[in-house]
Image (cartoon, rainbow, N blue to C red):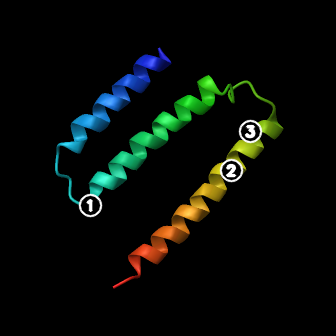
């Protein structure tokens, strides 16, 4: 079932890539990729049944990734 959900999200990603949403193309692509990442983390990496410490480290990793993306985007958006 998870594989079918991932395939459906892949089809949605490809279908929306042909639609011009303006600046929301990137936002939509990031939301779909985040949904795919959550499915992979929970089901294939077994974080749903993992210990709290393992979940904490996975969460801290994504928090750090969010910091890096925020810093990169703040640099990109403030350039002329």
Which residue corresponds to the image point at 81% horizontal and 31% vertical from the top-left?
A: 51
Q: Does label 2 or label 3 sit earlier along the sequence?
A: 3
Residue bearing the label numbered 3? 55
Which residue corresponds to the image point at 31% horizontal and 37% vertical from the top-left?
A: 13
Q: CA distance from mark 2 to mark 1?
A: 27 Å
Q: CA distance from mark 3 to mark 1?
A: 33 Å
The reply to whether discs 3 and 1 touch (Cβ–Cβ < 8 Å) is: no
Badge 1, how many Cα within 10 Å: few under 14, some, many 20+? Answer: few
Q: Is residue 44 above or below residue 12?
A: above
Depth check: 75 or 22 in front? 75
- Where residue 79 appears, as percent x and y from the top left, is 38, 82
Q: Quadrant of residue 49?
A: top right
| Position of residue 5 in the picture relative to residue 47 (left or right) | left
Q: Does label 3 or label 1 sit earlier along the sequence?
A: 1
Q: Quadrant of residue 65?
A: bottom right
Which residue corresponds to the image point at 41% horizontal and 81% vertical from the top-left?
A: 78
- Where residue 77 appears, as percent x and y from the top left, is 39, 75
Q: Does label 2 or label 1 sit earlier along the sequence?
A: 1
Under circle 2, the secondary element is helix
Residue bearing the label numbered 1? 23
- Please identify the residue farthest to the top as the structure is shown: 1
Which residue corresponds to the image point at 65% horizontal and 28% vertical from the top-left?
A: 45
Badge 3, how many Cα within 10 Å: few under 14, some, many 20+? Answer: some
Which of the numbered marks, if any, corresponds to residue 56? none
Under circle 3, the secondary element is helix
The reply to whether discs 2 and 3 touch (Cβ–Cβ < 8 Å) is: no
- Where residue 4 appears, as percent x and y from the top left, is 41, 17
Residue bearing the label numbered 2? 61
Q: Is residue 73 above or below residue 26?
A: below
Q: CA distance from mark 2 to mark 3?
A: 10 Å
């Amino acid at each position: 079932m998870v594989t079918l959900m991932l395939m459906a999200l892949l089809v949605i990603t490809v279908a929306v890539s042909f639609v011009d949403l303006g600046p929301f193309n990137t936002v939509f692509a990031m939301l779909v990729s985040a949904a795919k990442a959550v499915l992979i983390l929970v089901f294939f990496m077994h974080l749903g049944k993992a210990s709290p410490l393992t979940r904490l480290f996975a969460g801290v990793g994504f928090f750090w990734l969010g910091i890096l993306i925020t810093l990169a985007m703040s640099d990109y958006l403030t350039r002329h």
